[in-house]
Image (cartoon, rainbow, N blue to C red):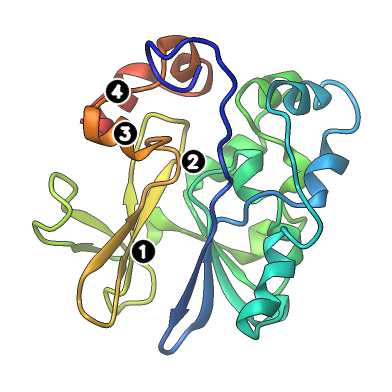
Amino acid sequence: MARKGAGLCPAEFPALVALILHPTEGAVLFDTGYDPAFFEATETLPERFYRWMTPVKLGHGEAVSEQLAGFGLRAEDVRAVVVSHFHGDHVAGLHAFPKARVFCSRFGAAEVARPGRFARVRRGVLAALAPADMDKRAVFFEDLPFVSVGAELAPFDIGADLFGDGALVAINLPGHCPGHWGLAIRGEDGRRTFMIGDAAWSRGAVRDNVPPPRLTTSLLGDTRVYRETLL
């Protein structure tokens, strides 16, 4: 279900998180991965279907809020969280950072408020994982100044400049689900690292240009647009 033509064998997909140390803004996270809050949010039906469809293993100390200690940081030191999209494996830890601004897409945030619990679960969204004060802390990509990222990330050429210095630029990567964005991170050496969320689920998928099967992409988003983004 994760790679076209690969069959139905089980596969593991780590929920990846990036810690970025911005020179003036401090600690910034790209996504938050899984957290015990995921299990609380999927305790009852229909949300329980989410847990059945994507079995989760989360060991002691693996939540990002716990891993920060290894970098000499506390959860309250995180100044901002950049959300690629609002699927549970990307936002389950949001609650742990109550002082952080939440950079996200307006269309992604709207998915959390979509009517109907069944409809939200089918699209991979658990409303309980969104902070209660989301409306006060959200900074929408669509409202930020857009800048060029040059030819380095072609064909993606523009994005939303989070802090006005070009260090972190959010780039629209449509198709996986409404409001799905990536993040271009400019390092001290000037080179960029491109965090792409779920625009692809493996390096091989990007290298070989092999998307997930249509059944998977159509359930969550738009198959045609997903494949155009992967190209």
Residue corresponding to mark 4: 210
Where is residue 117, by image quadrant? top right
Residue 39 bears which disc, if any?
none
Mark 1 or mark 2: whose residue is earlier in sequence: 2
Mark 2 or mark 4: whose residue is earlier in sequence: 2
Q: Secondary structure at mark 4?
A: loop
Which residue is the extreme one toward the right?
44
What is the three-letter code of the residue carrying label 1? Leu
How many other residues sit within 10 Å of disc 3, few (<14), some (14-19) or many (≥20)?
few
Using residue 19 as the reference point, say whether residue 144 is left or right of it. left
Please name whichever residue, 36 or 114, is drawn nearer the observer in this view of the structure.
36
Residues at badges 2 and 3 in contact (C-beta under 8 Å)? no
Mark 3 or mark 4: whose residue is earlier in sequence: 3
Residues at badges 3 and 4 in contact (C-beta under 8 Å)? yes
What is the spatial separation of the Cα atoms under label 1 and label 2, in whole angstroms? 14 Å
Q: Secondary structure at mark 2?
A: helix
What is the spatial separation of the Cα atoms under label 2 and label 4, in whole angstroms? 26 Å
Residue corresponding to mark 2: 107
Residue corresponding to mark 3: 204
What is the three-letter code of the residue carrying label 2? Phe
Using residue 176 as the reference point, say whether residue 19 is left or right of it. right
Mark 2 or mark 3: whose residue is earlier in sequence: 2
Using residue 115 as the reference point, say whether residue 43 is left or right of it. right
Q: Quadrant of the C terminus?
A: top left
